[in-house]
Image (cartoon, rainbow, N blue to C red):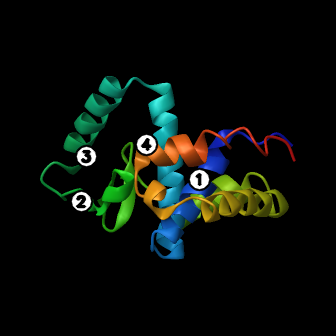
Amino acid sequence: MKINRFPKMAALQKFRALKLGFDLEIAEAIGIAEATKYAIFKNLSYKKRVAKEKEEVFKEYQGKKELDDKTFEIFKLQALDGLPYVGGKVYTSEDYKRAVFLRFGEEIGKKIEEWAKNIIDNCDEEVLKKETKFFNECWKPHRDELSEV
């Protein structure tokens, strides 16, 4: 079975969040939110994405709730009610499980997570705290591994 980069990024970000001290449910939510964020970056120009997100956020949450920039600051993610918020959607642990386990099955999901955990275990914590260093040192060298199972 062919495995694209999305579930691998989600799992890698999950284990990054765990190593940085977030609990399991929040780490899974961060994992799927980060994978979504990277997919958005890949598919839209930054200026268009930022303008669109600001417009959507403004329309949807105008006067209702404030988005929090501090909770997931290390990931450059906003939070709404304590959960990651990307592209007009709040992400949960269930979203992670759907993307990694339900789509690919339990066995392949475990292989994806094992692959991600091994990479994160070998990444320096200082690298995990910096988005660009994480991308260049932990993601880029490994992103095309485990493409078929």
What kind of residue is marked 4?
Answer: Thr
Q: Is residue 82 left or right of residue 94?
A: left
Residue at 26% in and 29% down: 51
What kind of residue is marked 1?
Answer: Ala
Q: Which residue is mark 3?
A: 60
> In this orientation, does residue 92 appear?
no
Residue at 35% in and 30% down: 49
Measure the alpha-carbon separation of dots 2 and 3: 15 Å
- Among the 4 quarters of the image, the one containing residue 53: top left
Q: Is residue 149 left or right of residue 77?
A: right
Measure the alpha-carbon separation of dots 4 and 1: 17 Å
Q: Earlier in the sequence, mark 2 or mark 3?
A: 3
Q: Which residue is mark 4?
A: 132
Q: Earlier in the sequence, mark 1 or mark 3?
A: 1
Measure the alpha-carbon separation of dots 3 and 4: 30 Å
Q: Which residue is mark 2?
A: 68
Q: Nearest the camera: 118 or 29?
A: 118
Q: Nearest the camera: 125 or 80?
A: 125
